[in-house]
Amino acid sequence: MRRRRFLALSAATLATPTFLRRAWAQAPIKIGMPAALSGGYAQYGIQAKRAADLFAKDIKAKGILGRPVEFIFEDTAGDPATAVRKAQKLVEKDGVKFLTGVALSSEALAVSAKCPEWKVIFMSTINGAGTLTTKSFHRYFFRVNTSGPMGARAVSLYLAESPMKRFFALGADYAWGRDSVASFTSQITAAKKDIVGTDFPPVGTKDFASYIAKIRQSRADGVFLVLPGQDATIYMKQAHQFGLNREVKPIMEILELENMKAVGDAMVGAIGSSRYPFTVDTPKNREFVKRFHELHGVYPDMFDGETYEGLEWLAQVITKAGTDDVEKVIDAWEDSTYEGLEGPFLMRKCDHQAVQPGFAVECVKDPKYPHPIPKILATYPGDKVTPKCRTEEFS
Amino acid sequence: MTRPRLLALAALVALAIVPWVLARHQLSLLTDLLIAGLFAMSLDLILGYTGMVSFGHAAYFGLGAYASALVLLHFTQPIPVALLAGAVLAGAVAVPVGWFSTRATGIYFAMLTLAFAQFLYTVAYKWRDLTGGSDGIAGVPKTQLFWGGPSLASPSAFYFLVAVCVVGSLALCRAVVRSPFGRALQAIRENERRFTSLGRDPRPFKLVVFVIAAVFAGLAGALFAPFRGFASPEVMFWVFSGQGLMMVVMGGIGTLVGPILGAMVFILIQELLSSYTEHWMIFTGLVFILIVIFLPGGLVGTARRLGARG
Amino acid sequence: MANAVEQLLNALALAGLLFLVSAGLSLVFGILRVVNFAHGVFYMLGAYLGFTTVALTGWFWPALVVVPPAVGVLGAVLESSTLRFIYRRPPIYQLLLTFGLALILEESIRVLYGPTAKGVEPPPLLQGAINLGGLLYPRYRLFLVVLGCAVGVAVLLFLRLTRAGLVIRAVAQNHEMADCLGADVARVRTLVFGAACALAGLGGVAAAPMTTAYLGMGIGVIVDAFVVVVVGGLGSIGGSMAGSLIVGAAQTWGAFYLPETAMVIMYAVMGVILVFRPWGLLGEEE
């Protein structure tokens, strides 16, 4: 496999007449993507890469500010130490000014902490950890994606209206699991509903039988699940085998296509939040899904969509700033708006979190698709799902 | 001058002039390689010289990293204080762990080190208030050399700190293995039963070298935290210990300087391969298997054998 | 009451799975004196090949029959082309060689199958739940209990009653003497390694309907297998059975009452046994 430099320049150069080529011979705009392309979390890094591949194809003709765009990928294998090493190489050797596509929150925290020193922009399109825009916030960090607390908020808003009253919370025993369950607990009790039990299985649990027994015993109406991809897949399969899903509704903080493909029909009926459901019914999104499917042969999952939106917005902001100088791009990005695939986005100046719509979705079967898909149950406007600046509270 | 001395002098000179020769990111990479080299060399003390296979060595690297991170982030002390904290914490934990582990030998010892290391990993992963849990501790600063001293924030300054630590540690370890204590270790490695039958108890020796190795691993971890700016549980995971063993074997078991080179080669191969293909693990595994089968002495061991012949 | 029965069955099902995974590891250690770090990857390979077999034939039962020998043959080939040359070396070399094999195999599986987990449906006979006096229990888990017992008994009988089993036990006790007495030690080693991989592969096929086939399932299971083998005794099949029951019970009840400390307790148990009785419950003192 060739080295991962995706030079939009070459194909475009061959296509343009000579007198225009001189204008192209400018320094490319470089975007570095230290993504988890191997190892247990590869499916997330691969989504970032797929989005970048499509975006590179889309802007090949125009470039940004008339300059070609160069994506440089590096494999972090999902390890924070490797992520920082690769990011440092991208910044110091390849001279990138923008880092994105980082898959894990632990990697993001480590890499982002170095960005003020390197003076490069870190654009999160995947990382949900609340602390990235609260305690660990700095000027060079921008989050385009829906955060974990925002996802939990969308779910809570939906459940506040539903007849379900009793909930069990099952979160994996690490940062995301703990924080999300805490956020959900406070919001659902504020909605005058009950948490009848919580449990924190270790990451990598293979057998959820005991937890399933506890959930059944608790007589909950629904179980709020915050489990990493593979654990969620295993839980759904086993809960289905125990017949639990009929009695206790699975509610997932993120409802991903990856899970739906792996679990299959057993997941039908699960509800939850999606950071980007590809079934959003706007002309722009339908067209994006079509182009994505043509290029990659699969339908876009959450991080495919969010990364594409991030890249498109970044391109617009660089154009607005008139330069890829990092400080000017930051200024141009703050308080700017963007019409994304999911709806309208606003980049808040106070914490660089993109305010965007939140979605409550349900996993349904649709004969047009080879696997179950997310059907949108409710859409919430950005200001209802985004927490107040630098806090974990909602208005 | 004998050839080894000439080589050593050449290496020292090379290390000294490197900041003016290498590009910035190459210098960063070299610093990274040296830290890994120190970790591997510390493992050689117990693997190469005493014949003890430890699957838990990464835990001491991790302990050093966390101690250093906390001292630098919360108390902003000069770096040597953080280094001392890391080395001391690693050594302190190694005492009880080593005391229990050395009650077993061979494969049982290896399993026991694995159990202890996984236990420590789980503690680091779950004790969120202290260690940041699965997110780790980010934003660790590089501070000064001593109170009121020069800052170590620049890449060359930090590189010199690491180079001095590694060269110094190598010198110390060489002194240890050449001493009567070191010779006793090698006797234990060769034939532990005979050692016992001569009326000597191997356990205190094993415990002491276990702690010394942990101290140097902790030093490596304490350098890692300000260099990379964070500490996280992954550096304590048993897979990292396994990679350490691979580095030692690649470089040359029982040569001290070999593992340093082995670590550098191991990481460089991965760096180069991962830029060309996302399936770099297959090639790394192949290279490694070939070395294990055909070059059991590792790079340095084989070089010495060839040098002795020629 | 129904709850206690359910927990017991859960523990037995998990024990059945753990036994299938760890029996091979125990054999390889007892007879070849090698710690096989690639063992988890053979388990994972079994799961993925099981998925492929089901996808090709539409049936689950053929996977149980076809996949273990295939994985076993692969293991035997790898052993005779790599491990065979380094038996005389210190154990660290063999250990690290299996580590290298694990890296290669794991990444190869990823190349072939991609990163998405592969779901496997249990056969119609084993789908759904069975009504046990008011308790609805998944049939597939009951099958795991039965399978674990059957395989355990089969392996024990093979080792105790057949001539091949006798030769294997002789090699385990004293390979030089066995060699003098005419046993083809190299061939025995290859066969045992292959058989151990086949057992791991069987474990993988059996696990797939319960956990799906996914990357990282090898690393995830290897530490569990080590704990089982240490507790039961390296080299003892009976020990693996006992160890699986203990670990299965500890994990099941631990998850129910103390999920957050369950892991820590496991390591503590492993540590205590290694310090005070390293040869495990049913192993042989060296």
Image (cartoon, coloured by chain):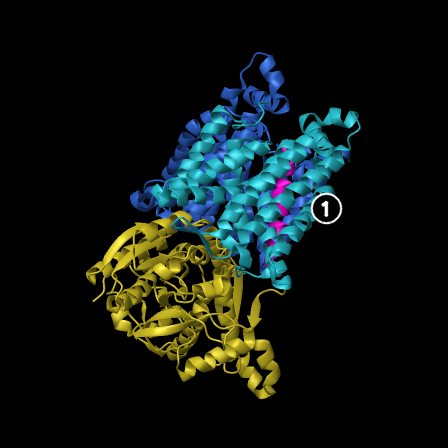
Chain colours: A yellow, B blue, C cyan
Number of marks in the rendered image: 1
Write the residue at 45% across / 25% down: B99
Q: Alpha-carbon neighbours of circle 1 within 10 Å: few (<14), some, or many (≥20)?
A: some
Question: Residue lying furthest front in this view?
Answer: C133
User: Horizontal and vertical percent for residue B229?
Assistant: 40, 50
Which quadrant does the N terminus of chain B fall into?
Answer: top right
Residue C229 image position (x, y, % from top left): 54, 35
Q: Is residue C98 magenta?
A: yes
The chain letter under disc 1 is C
Amino acid found under the numbered disc labelled 1:
Val
Residue denoted by label 1: C77
x and y percentages locating residue C174 in the rendered image: 70, 25
Residue C18 position within the rendered picture, expressed as x and y whole percent measured from the top left: 52, 42
Front residue (pair A166, C112): A166
The structure residue drawn at horizontal position 56% and vertical position 73%, both measured from the top left corner, is A7
Residue A203 shown in magenta: no
Residue B130 in the image: above or below residue C174: below
Q: Which stretch did the figure color magenta? A: C89-110
User: Residue at the top extreme?
Assistant: B199
Q: Is residue C277 visible?
A: yes
Q: Secondary structure at mark 1?
A: helix
Quadrant of the rendered image containing residue C35: top right
Picture quadrant of residue A229: bottom left
State whether the magenta stretch is mostly helix, strand or loop. Answer: helix
Asked if one can make out residue B63 in the rendered structure from this viewpoint, the answer is no
Q: Nearer the viewer, residue A289 or B6?
A: A289
In this rendering, the answer to whether C115 lies above or below B119 is below
